Image (spheres, grey):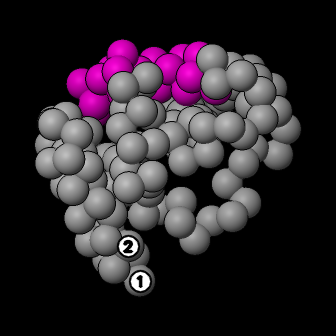
Amino acid sequence: MQDFYQNAFYGVVKETQENSGYILPVDIESYVVMLLADKIDKPDFLPKSTFAESYLQLKNSRDAKSLGDNCLFVTGVFPDYGLDQEYYISIGQSSYSQISYGFNQELFSSLAKHFRFIRHFVELSVRS
């Protein structure tokens, strides 16, 4: 089923790029597709505590990636969720920054640096 979702979201992302004129780098495009496909069947993706508490309790890169992904998903797919978007954007950027050194340094550094644009792109994708 995961392949079905990835193919479907790949089509959505490509269509959004065509309609909006925004072109994502291949690694960011792939990441967005995988993120959306991964979260589609997970209704319980939100952290058990608050986003801020989860950030303060980060123990490793996996935790930071998961929290960054949750922030990107929430701000892109549910832009009116919860608190002010700046709250989630800040935590998402900081979470990705925590893992920007080491494995996939360029990818996570780009996700942190361009978080606002990527979340906007995700919002455009799911609204189309």
Q: Which image quadrant for residue 74?
A: top right
Residue 32 lies, with reference to residue 88, above or below; the image says below
Q: Residues within 10 Å of mark 2 (few under 14, many from 20)?
A: some
**Where residue 42 sits in the image (x, y, percent)?**
63, 65
Residue 113 lies, with reference to residue 28, above or below; the image says above
Residue 70 highlighted magenta (yes or no):
no
Q: Tell me the quadrant of the picture where the C terminus can be found.
A: bottom left
Q: Which image quadrant for residue 37?
A: bottom left
> Magenta part mainly helix, strand or loop?
helix
**Looking at the picture, which amino acid does disc 1 mark?**
Met
Q: Could you tell me if residue 76 is visible in this image?
A: yes
Residue segment shown in magenta: 88-114
Is 84 positioned to the left or the right of 5 in the image? Answer: right
Residue tagged 1: 1
Label 1: state its secondary structure: loop
**Where residue 96 sits in the image (x, y, percent)?**
47, 26
Q: Which image quadrant for residue 5?
A: bottom left
Instruction: Compare residues 31 and 10 and report the one nearer the observer.
Output: 10
Is mark 2 in CB contact (under 8 Å) with mark 1? yes
**Where residue 106 sits in the image (x, y, percent)?**
24, 24
**Where residue 49 sits in the image (x, y, percent)?**
84, 38
Residue 19 image label: none
Residue 5 image label: 2
Label 2: state its secondary structure: helix
